[in-house]
Image (cartoon, grey):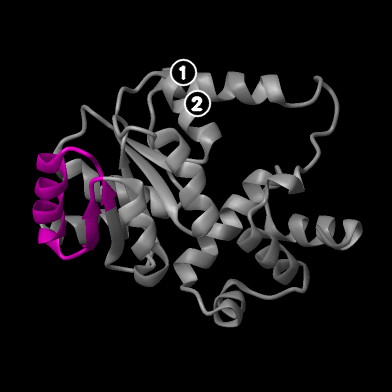
Amino acid sequence: MTKGHCADYWAANQIEVQLPLRIEIISDIRFTRESLSELLPRDGVLSILGSFAGLEEALVTLRQRQPQIVMIDEALPGGRAAIGQIRAEAPEVLVVVMAVTETAEKIVTWAELGAAGYIPKTAALADIAPALLNIAGGRQACTENVAAGLMRRLSMVGPAAGKTRKPMPALLTTRERQIAQLVASGLSNKDIARHLNIGLATTKTHVHHLLAKLNLERRGQAASWLNDHGNL
């Protein structure tokens, strides 16, 4: 996909993210690291900050370089535990699992571990940039089987049928708790971004995740709930 085509795609889908997307890659396969690092930045909308064979190397530079997305190879040894470590070190970073076998069971597992999205192993190189843009914008394309699996999992962990679903503030990250308080104070996304010195796109992503975790649809509902329940 050419740069012009990418721009048309993003404009048509109204995806608002800060470009170029800052990416780090973690894979113990050298060919994968070097190929993605060389090919992905060619359209000018992805910036590869670094590629690493293991998590320890990546964590050293995570705070310093402040990537928006960390891509982890599904086959990376210790990859599942790595998601939690990355989220703990940098809660605002989106972890994307790449080269995933797209089954409902695997996708649900990665989602429960904290992955913000995934790229299936069947994806072409031209699919990766649009996929990352979608994920950064709070979207994820998936098959009907995966969607059904996610719905089944949500129904299993949710309340009994007929009862009002309650928010689960314990699942919020430190950054999401900060943003929750600012939302409750009536601040706009732009005001929150300035207050926390983060990008507007990053703020929108956090608000999106906040609403999803509280099982709410609109920020007005979040402000009302937070004001009713006090500090998280």
Which label is found at residue 210?
Answer: none
Q: Which region of the structure is painted magenta?
A: 25-53
* Rendered position, 195 above or below 211: below
Which type of secondary structure does the marked residue at label 2 adopt?
Answer: helix
Q: Crowdedness of circle 1 by 10 Å Cα count: few (<14), some, many (20+)?
A: some
Which type of secondary structure does the marked residue at label 1 adopt?
Answer: helix
- Let me know if residue 155 appears in the view: yes
- State if disc 1 and disc 2 touch (CB < 8 Å): yes
Q: Is residue 70 left or right of residue 83?
A: left
Residue indicated by mark 2 = 108
Residue depicted at x 75% and y 56%: 222
| Amino acid marked by disc 1 | Glu
**Mark 2 to mark 1 CA distance (whole Å):** 5 Å
- Let me know if residue 13 appears in the view: no
- Residue 74, position in %: x, y? 32, 32
Asked whether residue 168 is drawn in magenta, I would say no
Specify the quadrant of the image occupied by residue 107.
Answer: top left
- Residue 14, position in %: x, y? 38, 58
Asked whether residue 51 is drawn in magenta, I would say yes
Q: Is residue 1 left or right of residue 227?
A: left
Q: Crowdedness of circle 2 by 10 Å Cα count: few (<14), some, many (20+)?
A: some
* Rendered position, 199 above or below 232: below
| Amino acid marked by disc 2 | Val
Residue depicted at x 67% and y 21%: 155
Residue indicated by mark 1 = 105
- Residue 162, position in %: x, y? 84, 23
- Residue 196, position in %: x, y? 58, 77
Depth check: 208 or 47 in front?
A: 47
Residue depicted at x 33% and y 55%: 58
Q: Is residue 224 left or right of residue 130?
A: right
Residue depicted at x 21% and y 27%: 122
